[in-house]
Amino acid sequence: MVEWDAIDTVLLDMDGTLLDLRYDNQFWLDHLPGVFGARENLSIEQARAAILDMTSARQGTLEFYCLDHWSKVLQLNVAELNAELGHLVQMRPNAERFLRSLRTHGIRTVLVTNSHRDGIDFKMDKTGMEVHLDRVICAHDLGFAKEQQGFWRRLHEIEPFDPDRTLLVDDNISVLDAAAEWGVRYLLAVTRPDSGRAPVETGSYAGLDDFAHLLPG
């Protein structure tokens, strides 16, 4: 799907790209509303709607992805509740095989995620995928979400890469748009971030479902 001779660096999202988004969707759409609703005497549908209203208002910002922020807003320990669905954390099809292949071919592999640091650590512990990565970069440490141009400017300051020789794989179209605006040349969108749901539209971006189709060499 790409000309690997033209790629020096691969930037990879975590949730919905390397990892199945089923865990996150089930947590935010079912588990958390269940706990919140029980406390507030709301049905799960009412609680889900209330939480969606709150999160939608912060879409594209660091607060949207911040477990500490939602713990404060909801008056719940969101990071602790996350752990209760840990058995659902798993890598997407052939993602680990892809990471191993990148390492074999000497291609720098960097995880770039909006996920809160607690979420990153939790998922690394569950999957062990950090051993296959050259670096893990958390948007919260840079002060900008990936949807914002400031993220890409700061990323380039701490992780120099040639945008003309870089591939980004992400399941968030807004993030791909931001990367394209900044100048990242090679962009792929994940077509089925959640294994339990139907494929999603990828707009003008080429789609990827299984990393077996992207192996270098």
Image (spheres, grey):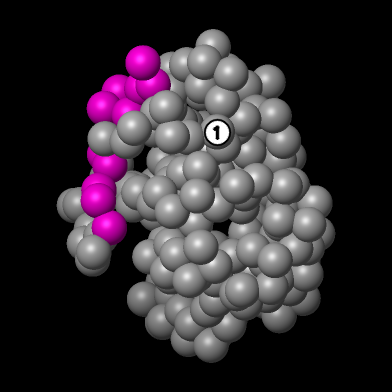
Q: Quadrant of residue 61?
A: bottom right
Q: Can residue 212 be found in the magenta stretch?
A: yes
Residue 71 left/right relative to 36 = right
Residue type pointed to by label 1: Asp
Q: Secondary structure at mark 1?
A: loop
Q: Is residue 40 above or below residue 11?
A: below
Residue in front for this viewpoint, 162 or 26: 162
- For the magenta stretch, what is the residue range? 205-217
Q: Is residue 203 above or below residue 112?
A: below
Residue depicted at x 51% and y 44%: 166
The C terminus is located in which quarter? top left
Q: Which residue is denoted by mark 1 in the rendering?
A: 8
Residue depicted at x 74% and y 47%: 159
The N terminus is located in which quarter? top left
Residue 1 seen in this snapshot: yes
Task: Looking at this view, name the residue that lies furthest to the top.
Answer: 104
Residue depicted at x 71% and y 80%: 73
Q: Is residue 152 above or below residue 195?
A: below
Q: How many marks?
A: 1
Residue in front for this viewpoint, 182 or 214: 182
Q: Is residue 136 above or below residue 49?
A: above
Residue in front for this viewpoint, 1 or 22: 1
Q: Position of residue 24 (x, y in %)?
A: 48, 53
Q: Can residue 49 be found in the magenta stretch?
A: no
Residue 50 left/right relative to 140 = left
Q: Quadrant of residue 203?
A: bottom left
Q: Position of residue 39 (x, y in %)?
A: 61, 74
Q: Position of residue 115 (x, y in %)?
A: 64, 55
Circle 1 packing at 10 Å, graded few (<14), some (14-19), many (20+), is: some
Residue in front for this viewpoint, 179 or 60: 179
Residue 94 seen in this snapshot: no
Residue depicted at x 36% and y 76%: 45
